[in-house]
Amino acid sequence: MISIAVVIPLYNKGLHIRRALDSVLAQSRQPEEIIIVDDNSNDEGPAEAAKYTDPRIRLLRRSTPGPGGYAARNLAIENARSEWIAFLDADDAWTRDHLAAIERLIDAAAPEPALAGVFSGFEIVELDGAKRPDRYTQRYGRKQVELLDFTRLLQVWLELEECPLWTSASVFRRDVLQEAGLFPAGRCNRGGDKDLWLRIGAIGRLAACPAVTAVYYRDSINMVTRSHSTNVRHCMCETINGMLARGWSEFSVPLRKLFNQEVFSYAVYALKGSRVDPVAWRGYFARENPIKFLILAAASTPVLSLGVRGAYSAWLRLRR
């Protein structure tokens, strides 16, 4: 039987932490540990968490808030005793059988020595209450287990145009998280989750769980995606450049394309408010995507960026 620690970073999520914790305590397969790390919140979140008396719950505290919850998760991982780490953000939740489904998959894959992590499907709840499945589930379905080696991970990531793993639906071996270098605390404000998943994917296989067992609420307060600009250099840029510099020739093309994809995605969001900072897309591989390269160049030019933003706004209106 495997052991599982649930890790929950907490920063000003007082309105949501009980929903997250209740979903953990309602699991049909209970975790061995529940580690909450308060990132120096200034709301009622820590007090709400402290009301729970379950002896498995540990509330750790940090004196300085860490962007993205990366340092908080790292602290929890270092303090965990369990073999597997299940991540849950304080504003998300799990269905009753999340950990049970994960454990069944891990047990079934026991002969697979390189299994580094497992990710399930998740349901997205929009501001108006509308619900939809994650993009991996929409594209490939969840009828059977899929094992993703690094080649397949890159292929799926590029096909979906987004990372197939989502933090609150992902569980990893603790030793693999440590081997990969943990979350990039101090190196970036957002995108650090994907940066770590990429590094883990290069170490061992990832298994797609054939179930939708997590819930992502878009009505959450204090979301990182709303509080930090994308008009910055993507956290994954240096990681990918490092992989390419080490001569990973068989992965060079998909890695370059992934670099471009993530950088361009950040630029698209940045265009909503300002011209794109040239530093944000430095090193873009023009030969892989020449048209998007020209768009980025125009979006970074003070005069031309206005036209690009106008064209982008028009395109968004047509999509509605």
Image (spheres, grey):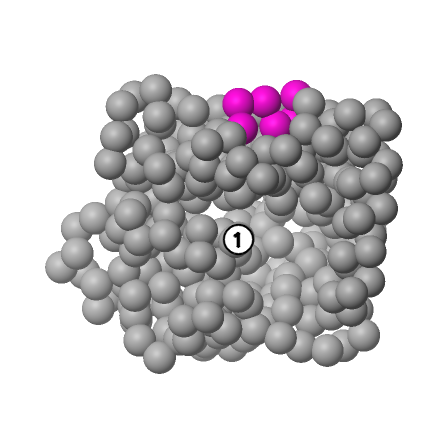
Q: Picture coordinates of residue 84 (x, y %)?
A: 36, 51
- Extent of the magenta region: 279-284
Front residue of 248/317: it is: 317
Q: What is the three-letter code of the residue carrying label 1?
A: Glu
Q: In this picture, is 241 found above or below 11?
A: above
Considering the image in quadrants, where does the N terminus appear? bottom left
Q: Which of 67 and 20 is in front in this view?
A: 67
- In screen coordinates, is 112 left or right of 244? left
Residue 310 locus on image (x, y percent): 85, 46
Q: Residue at x 46, y 70 (%)?
A: 139
Name the residue tied to disc 1. Answer: 162
Reply yes or no: does residue 178 show up in magenta. no
217 vs 257, nearest the viewer: 257
In this rendering, the answer to whether 11 lies above or below 53 is above
Q: Residue at x 53, y 53 (%)?
A: 162
Whether residue 205 is visible, yes or no, is no
Can residue 180 be seen at all in this image of the molecule? yes
Instruction: Please state the horizontal and vertical placement of residue 296, each as a whole percent of the image.
Output: 66, 33
Residue, far left: 111
Q: In this view, does 244 lie to the left or right of 78?
A: left
